[in-house]
Amino acid sequence: MTQTIPAKDINIRYLVDNLRLKRNQDQEFFREWQDNLSELTDLEKQLLNQVKSGFINLIDYPPVLENIVIMAVVDPILFIGGFFLHPFYIRSEPAINLAVEDKDIIIKGKIDISLKDQF
């Protein structure tokens, strides 16, 4: 029987224990997201290192709540990347379901933001 869990009840510890989530610090992970990019300024590197340190601090002291991650990680990255500026805009997204087929688990929740290019 499939179990449905509200996304608000899921934390990193649950994902590690039940779905084998692992921290990956391999610099080659998602290589396609790293190639052919413009060079970051020293200030951008410094700000992103602070965001990374803040996130690691958050996951070391659970619970890691969605709104805190958005405030401490997502918002600063969007700001540093200029994603609040034209031609991008932020809008809310509807609820989604995440089905983990091999565990008969469904996690219900919503994505709070998405980036859209208005062109």
Image (spheres, rainbow, N blue to C red):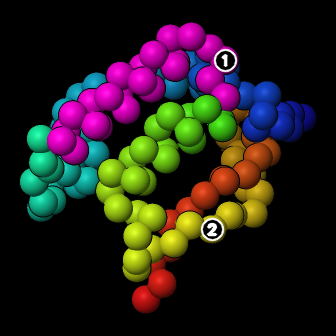
The spot of residue 62 in percent (x, y) is: 62, 14
Q: Label 1: which residue?
A: 63
Q: Distance between the residues labelled 1 and 2?
A: 26 Å
Q: Please tell me which residue is depicted at 56% across the width and 62% down the height of the picture.
A: 114
Q: Are marks 1 and 2 in contact (CB under 8 Å)?
A: no
Q: Badge 1: how crowded within 10 Å, few (<14), some, or many (20+)?
A: few
Secondary structure found at label 2: strand
Q: Is 31 inside the magenta-drawn segment?
A: no
The spot of residue 89 in percent (x, y) is: 51, 72
Please state, as top left, top right, bottom left or bottom right, where the N terminus lies in the image.
Answer: top right
Which span is picked out in magenta?
Answer: 43-65
The spot of residue 117 in percent (x, y) is: 45, 78
Secondary structure found at label 1: loop
Please state, as top left, top right, bottom left or bottom right, where the C terminus lies in the image.
Answer: bottom left
Earlier along the polypeptide chain: callout 1 or callout 2? 1
Say which mark, if any, is on residue 83: none
Q: Please tell me which residue is depicted at 29% across the width and 37% down the height of the picture.
A: 48
Position above or below: 78 against 105: below
The amino acid type found where label 1 is placed reads Pro
Position above or below: 115 against 22: below
Camera-side residue: 106 or 14? 14
Position above or below: 93 against 86: above
